[in-house]
Image: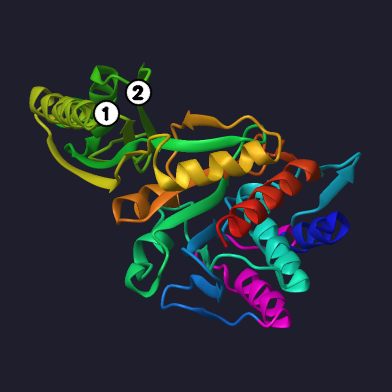
Amino acid sequence: MNKARLLQTFLDLVRIPSPSGKEEPVAAYAAARLEKLGIASECDAIGNLVARMPGVGESLLLTAHMDTVEPAARITPVVEDGIISTDGTSVLGGDDKSGVAAILEMAEVLASEKSPHRPLEIVFTVQEEVGLHGAKALDISRLQARMAVGLDAGGEPGTIVVQAPSQDSFRAVVHGRESHAGTSPEKGINAIVIASKAILAMPLGRIDAETTANVGIIEGGTATNVVPNLVHISGEARSLNSAKLEALSATMRLAFEHAAADSGGEMEVTVQREYNAYQLSASEPVVALVSQAMQDLGYTPMLVSTGGGSDANVLNHRGVSMVQISTGMQNVHTLQERIALADIASAVQALLRCARMDA
């Protein structure tokens, strides 16, 4: 492994703007790098980049996503003592360009050494941050691998994410009655008040060790002198326990409906399952594979649960057993995001070990 090359790859990637839905420049960069190694790749209809490295043994899928959250129109990475951060005006984009960089470095090493390895399939997905859309659109039937390792997690080297929650999103439209707030407020029905009552009646935040809920967007009103007749609200609920999630989503829906009925307004509520939970045991082949690789490298395998969703939720639900491992990303989705080059390098070592085992 060449750490200087790995660092340069990561810096190249984070300097390329790639908000969700606009990942083409990153895909082009990755495709060009793979082509130089003799590895063909192609983009599917939604923009996922798919590549294959022939080998011997059971196939393994390696994946990371190319999009980042905003603000990321211009990222200026700062490198100091092996730590990469930003100048404080943007996110870094280590989520998940650290994963993309690690996979590209692994490919460089295997291609240069020409050493035996298992067949590898590489997928760089799009639109992960806005709903896992790339993974949902991926044609699984075109992949041979039924085991997958993703690089979209934080934590110490040795971290293996084996459990993640289901998520329901909800969107509510509150209908009140418009009137002049100064001359005839009693003729109006305030949609913002209805929405407020509904939100106050909901269980929000940390519900229990397995379950969370949040209201994230409220849009409504036209002027201070108009009783608002329309409010849009968006939020979510997550749980590792499907029964708890269904009960929580039903409770949130009822809170809206009761608030509207009590105030004389009307309500439209839509609840949608965004992705399903997964939980893999220590004996699952992909977990055993990655755990052994970590042990061989001197790391203690740590099987952990997360409250976040990822492409692993989609692929596990579709029959590909997938774990996420850490690249060391910290403070993701903030202006304080940072990552250590040593941690990305550790992820590369883990990939190389997994690729060579049983080859």
Name the element at disc 1: loop
Q: Residue at x 58, y 34 (%)?
A: 159
Give the mark nearest the N terminus, 1 or 2: 2
In the drawing, does residue 257 fall left or right of residue 174? left
In the drawing, does residue 69 fall left or right of residue 78? left
Quarter of the view holding residue 234: top left
Q: Is residue 32 magenta?
A: yes
In the drawing, does residue 52 fall left or right of residue 44? right
Q: How is the image coloured?
A: rainbow
Q: Is residue 186 magenta?
A: no
Report x, y in % for residue 294.
63, 39
Q: Are marks 1 and 2 in contact (CB under 8 Å)?
A: yes
Residue 16 showing in the rendered view? no
Question: Mark 1 sits on what residue?
Answer: 241
Report x, y in % for residue 44.
44, 77
Kind of residue at disc 1:
Asn
Quarter of the view holding residue 327: top right
Q: Residue at x 69, y 79 (%)?
A: 32
Residues drawn in magenta: 14-38
